[in-house]
Image (cartoon, grey):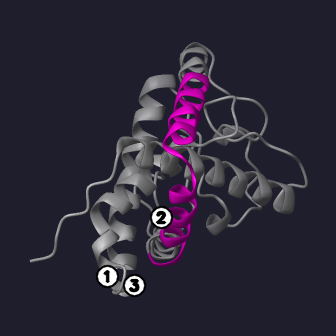
C-alpha cells in the first residue's frame, strides 16, 4: 500500500496564491490579446482570481497520485473544475445579482454557467497542473526556508483578507468585468472567467 503524502498547510496556501495569480495573469493576457486592453478580471481588486487557486488545490489534493495517468487526470479535471465553475457562477449571480460570465451561446452549455469548450480547457489545464506544473512547484517550494514560507503565507493572507473584506462590499464590476460589458467576439476557450 502506498504511503499517504501529508503536506503542511503552507504548501497549499502558497499553491493557492501562486495559481490564483497565474489565473489572473492568464485572463489579463487573454484580454490584452482579444480586446486589446488591460482588464483586472474578477470580483477582487488584487492580482488574483481565487477560483483558480481553489480549483488547483482541489485537483492536487484529489488527483496528485494519478500523475502517471494523464487521461484520467484530464477526465476528472473536466468534471471537478466544471462543477466548481457552475456552482461559483450560480453563487456569484445569487450574491450580487449579476453574471460575470455567460456561455449561453456556446455548445453544450448548462444555464450559461458552463460549456463544453471550457470543460475541455479545464481538463487540459488540470493535466498540465498535475503532470507538469506540480513537480516544478514542489522543487521551488522546497528551496524556500520554513521562515520564508511562513512569512509569505502571512503577508499574502493578510492582503487577501483585506481585499476580500473590501470586495464583499464593493465587488469589481468595471468595464469588461460583468457579462453585460463583455463583447461577444471573444471565443469561449479564452473565457475561463474566474472571479471569486
Q: Which of 7 and 94 is in front in this view?
A: 7
Q: Are marks 1 and 3 in contact (CB under 8 Å)?
A: yes
Q: Position of residue 74 (x, y in %)?
A: 40, 78
> Within the image, what quadrant is residue 185 found in?
bottom right
Q: Which residue is drawn at 62% across and 23% down?
A: 171
Q: Residue at x 56, y 70 (%)?
A: 136
Task: Decide whether residue 185 is among the magenta residues.
Answer: no
- Closest to the camera, between mark 2 and mark 1, is 1
Badge 3: few (under 14), some or many (20 or more) residues near its Cα, within 10 Å? some
- What's the magenta region? 131-160
Q: Which residue is drawn at 37% across and 61% down?
A: 59
Q: Position of residue 33 (x, y in %)?
A: 85, 62
Residue 14 visible in image: yes
Q: Nearer the viewer, residue 80 or 94?
A: 80
Q: Distance between the residues labelled 1 and 3?
A: 5 Å
180 on left or right of 86: right
Where disc 2 sits, the SS reads loop
- Where is 92 relative to 106, above or below? above
Q: Where is residue 145 in the image (x, y as percent from the top left)?
A: 54, 47
Instruction: Check disc 3 and report the residue beneath it.
Output: 70
Amino acid at each position: 500500500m502506498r504511503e499517504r503524502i501529508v503536506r503542511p498547510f503552507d504548501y497549499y496556501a502558497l499553491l493557492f496564491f501562486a495559481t490564483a495569480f497565474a489565473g489572473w495573469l492568464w485572463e489579463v493576457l487573454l484580454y490584452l490579446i482579444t480586446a486589446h486592453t488591460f482588464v483586472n478580471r474578477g470580483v477582487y481588486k488584487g492580482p488574483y482570481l481565487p477560483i483558480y487557486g481553489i480549483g488547483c488545490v482541489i485537483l492536487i489534493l484529489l488527483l496528485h497520485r494519478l500523475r502517471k495517468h494523464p487521461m484520467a487526470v484530464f477526465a476528472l479535471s473536466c468534471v471537478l473544475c466544471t462543477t466548481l465553475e457552475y456552482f461559483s457562477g450560480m453563487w456569484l449571480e445569487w450574491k450580487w445579482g449579476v453574471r460575470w460570465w455567460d456561455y449561453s451561446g456556446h455548445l453544450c452549455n448548462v444555464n450559461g454557467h458552463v460549456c463544453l469548450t471550457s470543460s475541455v480547457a479545464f481538463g487540459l489545464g488540470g493535466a498540465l497542473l498535475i503532470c507538469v506544473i506540480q513537480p516544478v512547484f514542489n522543487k521551488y517550494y522546497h528551496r524556500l526556508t520554513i521562515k520564508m514560507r511562513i512569512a509569505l503565507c502571512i503577508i499574502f493572507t493578510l492582503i487577501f483578507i483585506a481585499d476580500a473584506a473590501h470586495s464583499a462590499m464593493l465587488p469589481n464590476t468595471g468595464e469588461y468585468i460583468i457579462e453585460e460589458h463583455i463583447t461577444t467576439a471573444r471565443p469561449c476557450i479564452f473565457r475561463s472567467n474566474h472571479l471569486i
